[in-house]
Image (cartoon, helix red, strand yellow):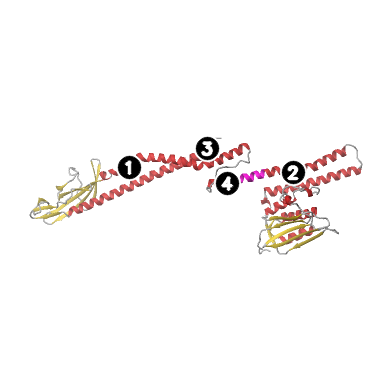
């Protein structure tokens, strides 16, 4: 099977791609926005410089003092230009022209171009010259005695963007280095973050390779997703190991339980077939085989029932049912027939309901009552009760048998477990295990109250159930 790329590699690859894309788009966005800002600033400076220079030009019929101003003979007088007239300001150059386009004063880098742009009132032009792009702004000056003059301001867009271009070139050198450092750091962080997943993968591989269900993920803590994954994985393995161990014990116990009746049947048949027997002897042998066959049949049926409940509880749908009527009918059917020294009582409170499966609850009650018959005093009493306690239906079956020792009370619900007092009593060893499993399917709790010499009481505490209108 071809090995795919690791999560570490994919994470690093995609993170690097996202990082490069983000840095590239951010750089382009900043570069574009910076260019727009610089161009906007240049245009504002250009307009401001031209308007300021316009206010520094006047026409006089005679030359006046102070001599610091510049006087240019023009038409019938003089053009007075303030000494503050700026030929260049912030990269902006300004030049004064007459109506025919003759340069009168100032600087014009494009003055020698034969294809110079015509003047346009308060209009911004763009012109390329010598590999540079210039922005031009014309302003007409109306002088009554001198006619119309033109003041043209211009700024080199290429020169204005030169610092940004230098920054761009420097960025193109530094950004790959920074991206490389970021990728190395990202690889380190990714490796640290994914190292717990590596432990999960190694543990799972060891379990799969060596069938070691006792292995657990160690050294992965915290409340993040990886820590929760490790905890969930360990819980899953605990349950899986417990399930395998339970099934192993079940198989072993079932084999042991079936071995005894099978051995008895084999021994009885071999002994009977050794020679000719009388009809009474054959009958006696067949009765022994029949008893052991019934025991095997009951054991197999209980095992199948338990397996079905354990593996597919959804096969037993729950529905609202009249628990009082069910218990009353089942308890009445199991009452002793004819004269019996055993006292049998049932105390059933009416109007109690539960969400349950009628067949399973009938089996639960039958197992509890049969257990009371089996282990109780033959001349004693059995009491079946159903009542409400704290809003919850509680079913109890009480006997006056020998009681169950404290050390055995937790074990009697295990499959095939038999206490010392019950080894001589006929049974499959699955009755109480089925009771507990049925209770779990119904979300009910099982309690045992037992005292040596005073009997036992098994209690099934059902969840709270609100009576439906259907009843």
Q: What is the spatial separation of the Cα atoms under label 2 and label 1, in whole angstroms?
A: 82 Å
Q: Is residue 123 visible?
A: no
Secondary structure mostly seen in magenta is: helix
2 and 1 marks in contact (CB < 8 Å): no
Under circle 4, the secondary element is helix
Count neighbours of disc 2 (C-alpha within 10 A) and say few if under 14, some if 14 to 19, many if 20 or more: some
Under circle 2, the secondary element is helix
Q: What is the spatial separation of the Cα atoms under label 3 and label 1, in whole angstroms?
A: 40 Å
Magenta residues, start to end? 231-244
2 and 4 marks in contact (CB < 8 Å): no
Image coords of residue 444 (percent x, y): 68, 56
Q: Which residue is mark 1?
A: 168
**3 or 2: tag closer to the N-terminus:** 3
Question: Which of the two marks, 2 or 4, is nearer to us in this view?
Answer: 4
Q: What is the spatial separation of the Cα atoms under label 3 and label 2, in whole angstroms?
A: 45 Å
Q: What is the spatial separation of the Cα atoms under label 4 and label 1, in whole angstroms?
A: 51 Å
Q: For this view, does 114 lie left or right of residue 448?
A: left
Marker disc for residue 254: 2
**3 or 1: tag closer to the N-terminus:** 3
Question: Which of the two marks, 3 or 1, is nearer to us in this view?
Answer: 1
Q: What is the spatial separation of the Cα atoms under label 2 and label 4, in whole angstroms?
A: 34 Å
Marker disc for residue 4: 3
Question: Which of the two marks, 3 or 2, is nearer to us in this view?
Answer: 2
Q: Quadrant of the C terminus?
A: bottom right
């Amino acid at each position: 099977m071809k090995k795919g790329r690791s999560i570490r590699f994919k994470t690093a690859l995609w993170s690097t791609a996202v990082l490069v894309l983000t840095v590239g788009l951010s750089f382009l966005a900043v570069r574009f926005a910076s260019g727009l800002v610089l161009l906007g600033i240049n245009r504002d400076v250009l307009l401001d410089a031209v308007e300021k220079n316009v206010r520094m030009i006047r026409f006089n019929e005679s030359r006046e003092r102070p001599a610091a101003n510049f006087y240019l003979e023009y038409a019938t007088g003089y053009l007075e230009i303030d000494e503050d007239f700026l030929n260049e300001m912030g990269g902006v150059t300004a030049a004064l022209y007459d109506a025919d386009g003759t340069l009168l004063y100032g600087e014009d880098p494009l003055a020698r171009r034969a294809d110079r742009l015509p003047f346009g009132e308060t209009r911004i032009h763009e012109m390329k010259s010598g590999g540079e792009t210039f922005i031009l702004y014309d302003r007409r000056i109306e002088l009554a005695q001198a006619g119309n003059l033109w003041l043209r301001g211009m700024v080199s867009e290429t020169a204005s963007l030169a610092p940004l271009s230098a920054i761009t070139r420097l960025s193109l050198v530094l950004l790959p280095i920074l991206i490389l450092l970021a990728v190395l750091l990202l690889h380190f962080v990714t490796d640290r973050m994914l190292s717990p997943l590596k432990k999960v993968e190694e543990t799972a591989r060891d379990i799969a390779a060596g069938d070691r269900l006792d292995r657990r993920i160690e050294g992965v803590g915290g409340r993040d997703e990886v820590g929760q994954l490790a905890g969930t994985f360990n819980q899953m393995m605990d349950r899986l190991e417990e399930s395998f161990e339970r099934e192993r014990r079940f198989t072993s116990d079932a084999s042991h339980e079936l071995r005894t009746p099978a051995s008895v049947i084999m021994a009885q048949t071999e002994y009977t077939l050794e020679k000719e027997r009388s009809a009474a002897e054959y009958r006696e042998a067949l009765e022994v085989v029949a008893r052991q066959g019934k025991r095997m049949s009951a054991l197999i049926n209980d095992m199948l029932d338990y397996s079905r409940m354990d593996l597919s509880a959804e096969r037993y749908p729950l529905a609202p049912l009249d628990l009082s009527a069910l218990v009353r009918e089942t308890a009445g059917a199991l009452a002793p027939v004819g004269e019996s020294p055993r006292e049998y009582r049932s105390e059933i409170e009416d109007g109690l309901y539960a969400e349950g499966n009628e067949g399973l609850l009938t089996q639960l009650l039958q197992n509890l009552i049969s257990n009371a018959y089996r282990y109780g005093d033959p001349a004693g009493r059995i009491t079946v009760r159903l009542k409400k306690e704290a809003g919850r239906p509680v079913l109890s079956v009480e006997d006056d048998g020998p009681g169950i020792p404290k050390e055995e009370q937790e074990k009697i619900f295990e499959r095939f477990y038999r206490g010392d007092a019950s080894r001589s009593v006929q049974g499959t060893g699955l009755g109480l295990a089925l009771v507990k499993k049925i209770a779990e399917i119904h979300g009910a709790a099982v309690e045992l109250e037992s005292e040596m010499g005073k009997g036992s009481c098994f209690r099934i505490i059902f969840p709270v159930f609100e009576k439906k209108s259907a009843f």
